[in-house]
Amino acid sequence: MTLIIGMKTTDGVLISADKALSTTARISTARSKLRNYLDSHVIMGFSGSVSDIQGVENGLEEIFSAYFRQNKFNLDAFGKMLFSAEFKEFSKKYNAFVNFSGLIVAGEKGNSKIYKIFPLYRNGVYTWGTIEIVPREKDYDCIGSGDIAGATLLLENFYSQNRIPTKEEAVRLCALINYLVSLFTTGVSSSFEVVALTEKNVLTLPADETQKVSFEVRKIWNFTKTLGYQTFKNLDFSKWLITYIFNGGHKKPIKRMKSKGNTIVILDDMYKKQGKIYSKLLKLIPDAKVFENPSEAVSYIKEHTADIKGILVDRVVKSKQATLKFLEDVRELVPRIPIVVMGQKFAEDELNEFSERGVSRFILKSELAQDEEKILKTLQLTEDKEKMKWHVIKEF
C-alpha cells in the first residue's frame, strides 16, 4: 500500500508527517520566512502494512525533531535531514520517499500548529491508498500538479479493505475532506470539487445512473455550515466516481475574517469590581464590548465576526477551564483575530496552554492600570482614537 500526499500553492500551506514539528512551528519568524519563500510542492510517502504506521510516525518524529532542534526550523535543516544517514536508514526500512522542493507550513488555526497528515486515520477515516491534490483537468483522470484554484482531490482505493460507504454513510468522508480542504481553502477562488475514485463497487446504486446527494460540511477553514453535494457515477464494473462539490461563496467568510472592524471584545467576570483599570481602558477603546459571561461573548462574536478587531480576556473567567474553552471557541470562529490574555501573573504552563489556543500576547493587569500612554503601548493601539486599530507586534 502506498500513501502519497502532494500539494502546490503560491502561499505555502501545510503538509507534514505528524506532530513532530508542532513545537518548532511556533517560531513565527521562521514560519513567515518559509511561507514567503515557498512556491513549490511536497510529495511524501511510504509503503508497508498497517502495522508499520506507528513505526513511520515514530521514525519521522525522531528525525524531524532532532534536525529542527539543531537547525532552528529552516529550509537548510530540512534539506540536511533528507540527505542524512538517519533518513536514509528510515527510508530503507519503510520504503519511504520524499520529493522535496519546499516545506509547506501551517495555516491559521491555534498557534499555527503543524497539522498531521500521516495519521489521518485517527480522525476515524482510513486512508490506505493514494491521495494526491491535483488540478481539475478531466472528470477523474487528473494525475499531475498545479495551482490550487479549482483543485481536485483524487482518492484511489480509499477505505481500508477496499470498502467505501453507501451513500447514506458517505458523509463520513467530511472528516477527511474538511481536514484536507482547510489546508488550501485560501487558495481557492470559487467553488471546487473533491473527487473520490474507488476501485471496488460496493455501492447499492444503479450502474447507469449519476446520483446527487446533498450534505453539509460542518467545518472548513474554521467556519461552519458550508453546503455542497456529492455525486455518484459508475465508471465501469469495478469503479465508482464520487465527487464532493463544495458550493461557491465560501470565500465570503474568509473575507469577513480579514475585515477591518474596530470592535475589541473584552471578557472579564470581575470587570465591575476593577473600575480603575476599565475606566481608562474603555475611554481608549470606543468600540469595546465588555462581557462577564463567556457564552455571551461567544454569541456576540458569532453574530459580529466581521466587526471584531481583537479580543482581550481575563486569565480566569468563572474558571480556568471556562477560559480555555472560550479561547477554543473563539479560535474556531475568528482564527485570524489576535487574542490577548490579561492577569496578575502567569505560570509557565499557563503560557503554553494559552498560546496553544491561539493567544498572541500576555498583559499584566498592573500594566493596564497605568497611564494612558502605557495602556496604548501595552495593547498596541494607535493613538488615533477615530481609527482605533489593534496590532500585535510580538507573538508568544
Image (tube, grey):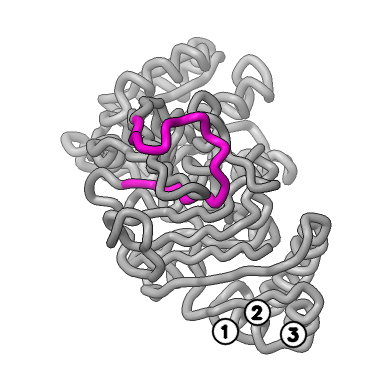
Three-letter amino acid code of the residue under disc 1: Asp
Question: Residue 379 location in percent, x, y?
Answer: 41, 41
Q: Which residues are magenta?
A: 193-211
Question: Residue 289 location in percent, x, y?
Answer: 35, 19
Q: Main secondary structure of the magenta part?
A: loop
Q: Residue at x 33, y 24 (%)?
A: 288
Is 195 included in the stretch rendered in magenta?
yes
Would you identify the image quadrant in which residue 364 lies?
Answer: top right
Ranked by sequence position, the earlier of labels 1 and 3 is 1
Which residue position is annotated with label 1?
76
Which residue position is annotated with label 3?
88
Structural distance between the alpha carbons of marks 2 and 3: 19 Å
Disc sitting over residue 71 in the figure? 2
Q: Is residue 138 above or below residue 345?
A: below
Q: Residue at x 36, y 49 (%)?
A: 185
Mark 1 vs mark 3: give the one in front.
3
Q: Residues within 10 Å of mark 3 (few under 14, many from 20)?
A: some
Three-letter amino acid code of the residue under disc 3: Lys
Quarter of the image where the N terminus is located:
bottom right
Is 310 included in the stretch rendered in magenta?
no
Is the C-beta separation of discs 1 and 2 under 8 Å?
Answer: yes
